[in-house]
Amino acid sequence: MIQKDDWRLLNDVEYLKNKEINPTDGEELAKNAPYLKECIFCWEKVRDNFRQWWYLPTDMSCCICEECYNDFKDMFNWRKLDGWDIDWTMRCPKCHTELKVISNQDYVYSCENCNILYDENFEDELQLEKHITDWREEALMKSLYEIDGFLTEDIQNINTFESHISEKVLSVLLEWACYGQNTAGIVLGRKYIAEIPKQWLQEHLLTVVKEYFDYTDDWNYRRLLELVKEQIPELLNDIIAVNSDTDNPHLLDIIEDYR
Ligand SMILES: [Zn+2]
Ligand SMILES: [Zn+2]
């Protein structure tokens, strides 16, 4: 006879009252629902073994070991199903919403509700925000490193590099700050440009824009003027002048906004 103060009832199990329960085994669980790792009552571990019986509520929110199933089935008034119609949709272990599969990553599943990424075995998780930031930082670092091994920590000393390197670096940062459609990328590019010594930036920006920057594209050009107005307003007129002979109505609109 199970006592009402059985330690296993201290877990968050109240919601399992009157549920329909499917039987399955450890092998099936390991294969189809790797996010279910242990018995919600006694924390017995799921093993990849078809001889280990398990019980699942139809919402797949947890799993119950054989011993706990037998001990609590009357107290919880469970109705046992035949186990044929288990919904094996991958679900978030925290909120139980359906997970999205992402590919080519260490983290294979994402929960858009919790903003968390999970690896294949649900052994490691990562906040989505952090992942995206890391990914962009890494991509930016790589694109700078391709310029003669330039490192992001050298941006503050960019004035000590030869101009064929430093100007290329600035051109890449400008692309990040201005070309992309993604706010996080734009912010990252601007953040690094803000680290450049002001005097060097004043002396080289116009050259770099003329040589490398696609300023005839109105999206890029608007982002560039935003950046210049914010960080080096003394160059605003020079940057407006690079498109002075345009008859593109979009560019003319932008110039009008900044004049
Ligand atoms: Zn158990
Ligand atoms: Zn979630």
Image: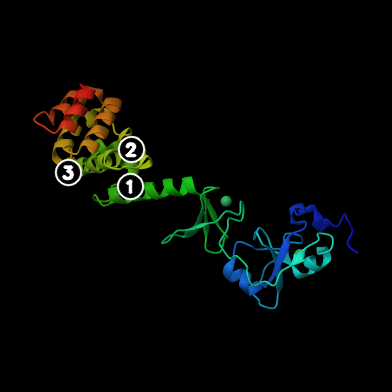
Mark in the foreground, 1 or 3: 1
Q: Residues within 10 Å of mark 3 (few under 14, many from 20)?
A: few
Q: Between marks 1 and 3, how big is the CA–CA gap?
A: 19 Å
Residue at image coords 43%, 48%: 132
User: What coloring was used for the rendering?
Assistant: rainbow
- Please give the name of the residue rendered at 33% of the width and 43% of the height, measured from the top-left corner: 152
Image quarter where the N terminus lies is bottom right
Circles 2, 1 touching at the beta carbon (< 8 Å): yes
Q: Nearer the viewer, residue 17 or 61?
A: 17
In this rendering, position of residue 96 left or right of residue 162: right
Q: Is residue 47 above or below residue 89?
A: below
Callout 3–callout 2 Cβ contact below 8 Å = no
Q: Residue reaching furthest left?
A: 245
Residue for point 8% across, 30% down? 245
Q: Amino acid at mark 2?
A: Tyr
- Relative to residue 149, is residue 71 depicted above or below? below
Q: Could you tell me residue 74's position as x and y percent?
A: 84, 63
The kind of secondary structure element at disc 1 is helix
Q: Which residue is mark 1?
A: 140
Cβ–Cβ under 8 Å for marks 1 and 3: no
How far across and how far down the image is residue 46, in percent? 67, 68
| Mark 3: amino acid | His
Q: Check disc 1: other Cα within 10 Å, few if <14, some if 14-19, many if 20+.
A: some
- Residue 160 percent coordinates (x, y): 24, 38
Give the Cα separation between the discs numbered 3 and 2.
Answer: 19 Å
Amino acid type, residue under disc 1 in the picture: Leu
Q: Which residue is mark 3?
A: 164
Q: Is residue 196 above or below residue 133?
A: above
Q: Secondary structure at mark 2?
A: helix
Residue identified by numbered label 2: 192
The answer to which of marks 3 and 2 sits earlier in the sequence is 3
